[in-house]
Amino acid sequence: MKNIGETISFFRKKKGMTQNELAEKMNVTDKAVSKWERNLSCPDINTISKLADILDVSVEELLQAKKQDYENNKIGDLIKLILKAVSIAMGIAVVVLNILNKIDEETSILMLGIAIICLSINLLDDKRENN
């Protein structure tokens, strides 16, 4: 199981919130949120329900912190990073190889197509997560 700090950080980032934004909604300082996430302190027991509401999770999810979900998210983030890297690498390769006159038009189009597909998969996954 992960600790409460990692759980708060995970769900905050999943919502696309900064520590400062979460702090404002919780009526605490961003330093307090930072301490929570670094396990230097914990949110007050009376605020756990409000924190769960802000993060759109149940109190149980917030307190139990399912490790499997966290690890699946890490794998998903890695896949997204790889897709972005492949897209950038393909684009750079096409430009460099064209400058060196070492690539034909058909191969350039194929490589750029792969880059576009990788970016599209990434964007579709982002859209799915936001809905």
Image (cartoon, grey):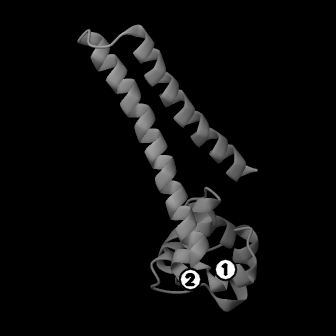
Residue designated by label 1:
62
Residue at 42% from the left image edge and 37% from the top image edge: 86
Q: Position of residue 96 (x, y in %)?
A: 28, 19
| Corner quadrant of residue 91 | top left
- Are there few (<14), some (14-19), or many (20+) residues within 10 Å of tag 2? many
Label 1: which secondary element: helix
Q: Which residue is situated farthest in the bottom direction here? A: 45
Judging depth in this view, the residue of 68 and 33 nearest the camera is 68
- Are there few (<14), some (14-19), or many (20+) residues within 10 Å of tag 1? many
Residue at 60% from the left image edge and 34% from the top image edge: 120
Left or right: 48 in relation to 104: right
The relative height of residue 117 versus residue 23 in the rendered view (above or below) is above
The relative height of residue 22 versus residue 121 in the rendered view (above or below) is below
Q: Position of residue 51 (x, y in %)?
A: 69, 75
Left or right: 82 in relation to 15: left
Residue at 41% from the left image edge and 16% from the top image edge: 108
Name which residue type carries label 1.
Leu
Q: Where is residue 28 in the image (x, y as percent from the top left)?
A: 60, 74
Name which residue type carries label 2.
Ile
Q: Position of residue 121 (x, y in %)?
A: 60, 39
Q: Quadrant of the N terminus?
A: bottom right
Asked whether the residues under the numbered discs 1 and 2 touch, taking CB atoms below 8 Å apart as contact, a structural biologist would say: yes
Left or right: 112 in relation to 103: right
Judging depth in this view, the residue of 102 and 12 nearest the camera is 102
Real-space Cα separation, disc 1 to disc 2, in angstroms: 7 Å
The relative height of residue 15 versus residue 35 in the rendered view (above or below) is above
**Lower position in the chain sequence, tag 1 or tag 2:** 2
Q: Residue 4 carries which label?
A: 2
Judging depth in this view, the residue of 34 and 87 nearest the camera is 87
Work out whether residue 29 can be spotted. no
Residue at 76% from the left image edge and 77% from the top image edge: 58
